[in-house]
Image: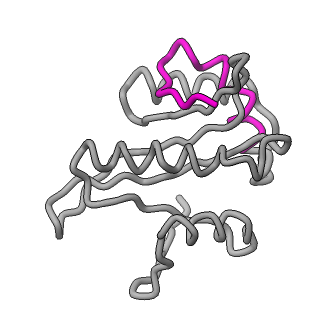
Amino acid sequence: MNVIRCTEKHVTLITPLFDAYRRFYHQPSDITGAQNFLTERLKQNESVVFAALDESGKALGFVQLYPTFSSVSIKKLWILNDLFVVPEARKQGVGEALMEAARKLAVETHAKGLQLETGVGNITAQRLYEKLGYVRNVETYQYFLKV
């Protein structure tokens, strides 16, 4: 397995995975929308995407991170927004390899750390995150305003 940092030229490779990720979260399939979204994020340097590829170059999974900042610590912070591994590649270290690429990016950019959230019922993801040293936040609440 090889983990690469994606550029615009990799969008067609990762679009089907991004669409499957969105469907996992109960969104309708939209290949064109997914491709346009990924292209814009990468073109504008608004996100970093890593993809895990098998020996033949087939995409097994991806992770997408968005930069933000912590005013309190006056440092960069990365939001690990998306992680997806194709079902046939799960439990083979793909998710861990992608999470390690994300961790290395945070170290290389002198970030405060990585922040993520997952669904309360996504026990598989919770186990992975906790195995890798992520700590569930018990000090703050998260709020959301739909507009």
Q: Residue furthest top?
A: 9
The mark total stands at 0
**Horizontal placement of 7 versus 83: left or right?**
left
Identify the residue at horizontal 81%, vertical 35% (top origin). Answer: 29
Q: Residue furthest right?
A: 88
Identify the residue at horizontal 75%, vertical 73% (top origin). Answer: 121
**Horizontal placement of 57 versus 90: left or right?**
left
Does residue 34 sit above or below 11 in this rendering? below
Please tell me in which quadrant of the rendered image residue 126 appears. Answer: bottom right
Q: Is residue 87 magenta?
A: no
Identify the residue at horizontal 56%, vertical 28% (top origin). Answer: 38
**Horizontal placement of 26 versus 77: left or right?**
right
Identify the residue at horizontal 52%, vertical 64% (top origin). Answer: 132
Q: Which residues are magenta?
A: 1-21
State the predominant SS element of the stretch in magenta: helix
Please tell me in which quadrant of the rendered image residue 77 appears. Answer: bottom left
Viewer-side residue, 21 vs 57: 57
Does residue 28 sit above or below 75 in this rendering? above
Residue 113 is situated, as x and y percent measured from the top left of the image, at 33, 60
